[in-house]
Image (tube, rainbow, N blue to C red):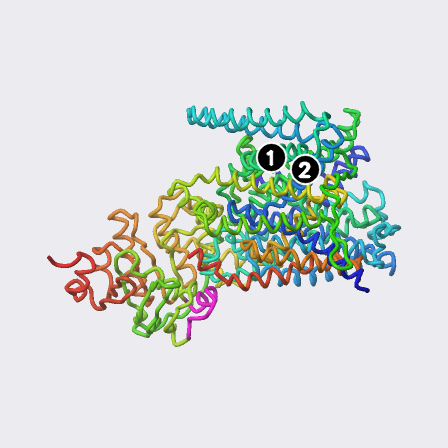
Amino acid sequence: MSRLVFAAAAIFALFAAPLVFSEHRIVLMNYVGIATLVATGLYLLTSIGGLISFGQAAFVGVGAYTTAYLATAHAMPAGLTLVIMLAVNFALALLVGAITLRLSGYYLSIATIAWGLGAYYLFGTLDMLGGHTGIGNIPGITVLGVSLTQARAFFYLEWSIVIAMMIAVHNLLHSREGRAVRALKSGGVMVSAMGIDIFRTRIAIFVAAAMLAAIAGWLFAYMQRFVSPAPFNLIASMEYLFMAVIGGTGSVVAALLGAGIVVALKDVLTNTLPKLLGSNVNIEALVFGVAVVAILQWSPGGLWSLARRVGGVLPALRTPDRSPSGGRTLPRKLRKDPGAELLSITNVGKRFAGLVAIDDVTMSVRAGEIVALIGPNGAGKTTLFNIITGVLKPSSGTVSFCGDQVSGRLPNRITELGISRTFQHVKLVPTMTTLENVALGTHLRGRAGFVAASLRAERAENAGMLGEAAAQIARVGLQGKEALSPTDLPLGDQRIVEIARALASDPYLLLLDEPAAGLRLTEKRALADLLRSLRAEGLGIVLVEHDMEFVMGLADRVVVMNFGRQIAEGTPADVQSDREVIRAYLGEEA
Amino acid sequence: MDFGIFTFLLQDGLNSAAIYCLMAIAIILVFTTTRVLFVAQGDFLVLGALTLSQLQLGRVPGTVWILAGLALLAFAMEGAQALRERSRRRALRAVLFCLLVPALVGGGVAWFSGKELGLAIDILATIALVGPIGPLLYRIAFQPLADKSILVLMVVATAVHFVIISLSLIFFGAEGWRTPALTDAQFALGPVLISGQVIAIIVTSLLLIVVLFLFFSNSVYGKSLIATASNRVGARLMGISTAQSGMLSFAMASAIGCVSGILIGSITTIYYDTGLVLTLKGLIAAVFGGLASFPAAAAGAVILGLIESYSAFFASAYKEIILFSLLIPLLMWRFVLAGHQDLEEEA
């Protein structure tokens, strides 16, 4: 609650500013507001989503130019220019995103450089947009009959929009889709194993960031009442990026911090300092460049997390999750009948160039049984997991699930069928709480999209997802750890959190990669009990494990692999007496 | 378009192609060895050209002060690390490379500038001044972040670009500069006159391509440089110093940039902020080479130079738009070639 009071007081103080400050300072604050909108988009796209765009200024430019053109050539009112401008930018961002977001990582960044430069040169070239001189005489904006031409009046319109947008982004980040965005940086394998469509999520944040930039452009056109190409060049895009880096991560307010510091510093360095020193040396680029390098080296979380560490007075680092209300959970799917065939692997092989990782494996898993996959290191067990879950494509053979062909589908599509997994090397998101990490597993059980989340129209569903996550955490015996970061848990517990996350997707088949590694004896027994009760519920479980005592006491059937080949299959007792298995584990008899 | 214009545009295109090629070579060199997409590469070209122009006018170039500042900063960082590690060897190396060498170079240039020792000496002095800036920048800005993602390194490179253009503006001013021609020789090729300068540019870039290609594909040292980029921990376990290989590739990058600046300074007027656009065109060529292959990047540079030259003739207003919009299909083509290995690599 104190956070709300704090925010309300800050907004109240902000809205009192035009009554107190000089005209120059209000104009400056209006520039800060515009920059904050763009930086808020980059907070979502870059700081959280891990995508770097060098094209944000171009989106601001498209917004500003579309507005200027419609308001002058067609004398349209501001409401209409806003709608058309947003539609134009939406289509454009979708197009640019669809082309460039197929590319990964740095390819995308290079592509946005091209987009940013291309758009900038186009502004200066098209006669319709006034070439290098731009478009002037844009009529002032009028809202409900009140003219907002004065900076003090404009301030209220602008900052209302800025604050609304910051709240929307904050809401988004604490929703189903927001958790998907926050997981993006943790690697594609885990994210798509949660059933999240990475490409769609990236497109969504790219478009959202572009829309925020476009609104900034719309405001810019009505504030300046004149547009020319210069403020929309590549350098401007880089400056927006710097705002996001300088502001840092931890809260959407970091975007405001970054934008405020950069704009204010720029004003001091270009207006005040040269007057003081009596020279016209321009050192703003130097200061920003040095600041960005210093921040990345000393405080990668930016000034926001630095202020947190130093001050300790600002609101807590992790936003508390909206409390799961009334123990609400999600409806469950019907179980498969025990004994029904779930997974069927037929003659599957995998070659990496010349290396044969898996050679002709055939096995099946039925509902209500635990199959253990054992074998020495390098036997191909994890590779087989990766083939089942679609991370790797088999070189030969087929995998099918409940009669559907699986091989060739994308990992997130396979998760949709009801297969869920954990990882040998734990893949949890360190910047999310344990509860939120487990809630990632419920992704496919919710429907609410980005718009609903921004408006918090999905409260009930989100509460159900968090409630489900809490229930799964309780089920694996980690209640009380919900609010911790997974990195604060011992490694054994982190593996258990992964099991809770896998269960949160309500799967038919559970693939566990070395779940007992790092557990103490009592914890292993608890895990075995959990797996037995899941089996009794009709889940199929495949277990990769090195702890033979654990495996032999638990599994219905054991499949043994060595050097990519399947060397034995049968009950634990059969396998333990198999000569080839003994040879694989103990070496040749003397 | 008659034959005369055709050959003129051809020569012009090849000329730009050679510069883009030099940019692309340095970008690929730095990227394959350090994973840094170095968007400030063109700024070395600017520093080279502007330094030479000042030396030719008999002035002490601002580059001396830039070198001095960077050297002191690097010395502070290296010295602090030497103290932490209590390493006498590191401390000695810091004194030698961050104090003595820059002081000798900077002091030497400051002392003899204005003595009119001729173009050749000025060129050597330019390379001696600009060359060390690359490794110093690597030590200061990139080395502490060398383990971070490609994207973080790209933001650092952008910040470094801001720093260099700002310093260039402070020390050289906003006006453009030209350097004297290296040679005024002209060669007749049929009806066309080709200037010696253009030939010098093309020969230099060809030479560099061949040398670097052989270095990376045949020498153990070249291969170990690439190994550091793809697996830093592994390289260190094999006894390869990632810091030294980073500084070496940045030294090569600043030297190549500086030489490019000396070569084109007499053909084009160079401003403090000319570098970025040249870098980006070099980047297009480098992407054509998949950010990996020197010969393919060279081919990309030739195509780019020719498209630029001929589109300047047919649709001059849209020249830059055409060039930069080429990059997107190019990137997609490269991405398809590379295959969708994202997930596999991680697994």
Residues at badges 2 and 1 in contact (C-beta under 8 Å)? yes
> A267 or A436, which is in the foreground?
A267
Residue at image coords 39%, 69%: A395
As shown in the figure, which amino acid type bears the numbered disc 1? Ile
Q: Quadrant of residue B316?
A: bottom right
For the residue carrying disc 1, how many other residues have a C-alpha within 10 Å: few (<14), some (14-19), or many (20+)?
many
Q: Residue B213's spot in the image, x, y percent?
A: 52, 51
Chain of the residue under the numbered disc 2 shown in the image: B
Residue B43 magenta:
no
Q: Which residue is mark 1?
A: B133
Quadrant of the snapshot with the N terminus of chain B:
bottom right
> What segment carries the magenta color?
A405-418
Chain of the residue under the numbered disc 1 shown in the image: B
A318 left or right, relative to B199? left
| Farthest residue, direction left | A590
Q: Residue A195's spot in the image, x, y percent?
A: 48, 62
Residue at image coords 57%, 56%: B295
> What is the secondary structure assignment of the residue under circle 1?
helix
Q: Which residue is mark 2?
A: B47
